[in-house]
Image (spheres, rainbow, N blue to C red):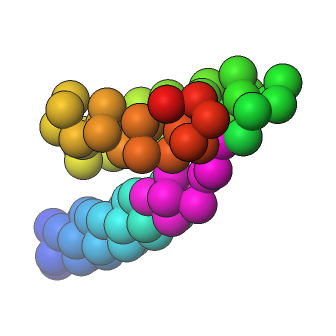
Amino acid sequence: MSMIHAADIIFHLHEIYREGTRNRRYSAVCELLKIKMVKEPPIHQDGLKMIGLIEQLQSLNSPLDHNLAIDIFLAFLSDSLS
């Protein structure tokens, strides 16, 4: 009887964790796509934020392809920086 309860607990923990991972992954992608770099001193902070979000996706087992990560980074550079 306790094995059934333990299995139920493990199942529910997996469900909760998977949902949390999905939410964190979604939030990271949304933040990544909203960043727009400008030709002002905060560009360094924006770049670090993008790198952090890409690393966060990797830690959630949803890594971006290396070339895609570079393309996303370059796409957000303003025309004056590219």
Residue at (23% x, 41% y) in the render? 68
Extreme residue toward the front, this view: 80
- The image shows residue 4 at horizontal and vertical percentages of 16, 76
Q: Nearer the viewer, residue 74 or 5?
A: 74
Residue at (51% x, 52% y) in the render? 32
Residue at (41% x, 36% y) in the render? 74
Q: Nearer the viewer, residue 52 or 8?
A: 52
Q: Quadrant of the N terminus?
A: bottom left
Count the numbered circles shown: 0
Q: Is residue 49 visible?
A: no
Q: Nearer the viewer, residue 61 or 13?
A: 61
Q: Is-magenta flag for residue 36?
A: yes
Q: Main secondary structure of the magenta part?
A: helix
Q: Nearer the viewer, residue 46 or 54?
A: 46
Q: Is-magenta flag for residue 65?
A: no
Would you say 66 lies left or right of 29 here?
A: left
Q: Is residue 43 visible?
A: yes
- The image shows residue 66 at horizontal and vertical percentages of 20, 29
- The image shows residue 33 at horizontal and vertical percentages of 49, 58
| Region of the chain picked out in magenta, as a range | 29-37
- Rendered image quadrant of residue 10: bottom left
- Rendered image quadrant of residue 11: bottom left
- Rendered image quadrant of residue 31: bottom right
- The image shows residue 62 at horizontal and vertical percentages of 24, 47
Extreme residue toward the right, this view: 41
In the rendered view, would you say 67 is above or below 30?
above
In the rendered view, would you say 64 is above or below 28?
above
